[in-house]
Amino acid sequence: MTFEKGDRIKIVYGEREVEGEVVIGSHNNAALMISFDAMLGGHVGVMPVLVHDQERGIYHSIIDGTEVRIQLA
């Protein structure tokens, strides 16, 4: 799964599910900056993530290592 700047996304962080947007991504989608209108763990409104399993949309927070699932909304 690949993401583009401006894509509307569904973010699953632990038990929470929120909608958000891709702010910017690396050319190979290995790293993304995502935004959302919520507080997820220690992240308030934005979160940098690194890919763990691109095919399944599994990323990890660069800040605390928490698993984040991302899908197109």
Image (cartoon, rainbow, N blue to C red):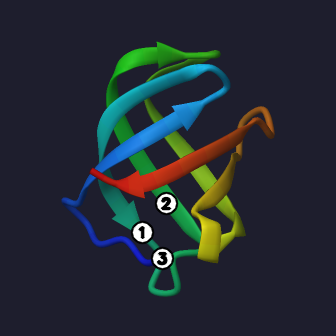
Question: Of all residues shown, which one is farthest toward the right?
Answer: 65
| Place of residue 3 in the rendered image (x, y in percent of width and height, measured from the top left) | 37, 71
Q: Are marks 1 and 2 in contact (CB under 8 Å)?
A: yes
Vertical comparison of 38 with 28: above or below: above
**Mark 1 burial class by Cα count in 10 Å: few <14, some 14-19, many 20+:** many
Q: Nearer the viewer, residue 3 or 46?
A: 3
- As helix, strand or loop, the secondary structure at mark 2 comes to strand
Q: Which residue is mark 1?
A: 25
- The amino acid pointed to by label 2 is Leu
Q: Nearer the viewer, residue 18 or 33?
A: 18
**Mark 3 burial class by Cα count in 10 Å: few <14, some 14-19, many 20+:** few
- The amino acid pointed to by label 1 is Gly
Q: Which residue is mark 2?
A: 32
Q: Which residue is mark 3?
A: 1
Q: Residue at x 66, y 55 (%)?
A: 59
Whichever of callouts 3 and 1 sits on the residue coming sooner in the sequence is 3
Q: CA distance from mark 1 to mark 2?
A: 4 Å
Q: Residue at x 57, y 66 (%)?
A: 31
Vertical comparison of 41 with 10: above or below: above
Q: Is residue 53 left or right of residue 41?
A: right
Q: CA distance from mark 3 to mark 1?
A: 13 Å
- The amino acid pointed to by label 3 is Met
| Place of residue 21 in the rendered image (x, y in percent of width and height, measured from the top left) | 27, 47
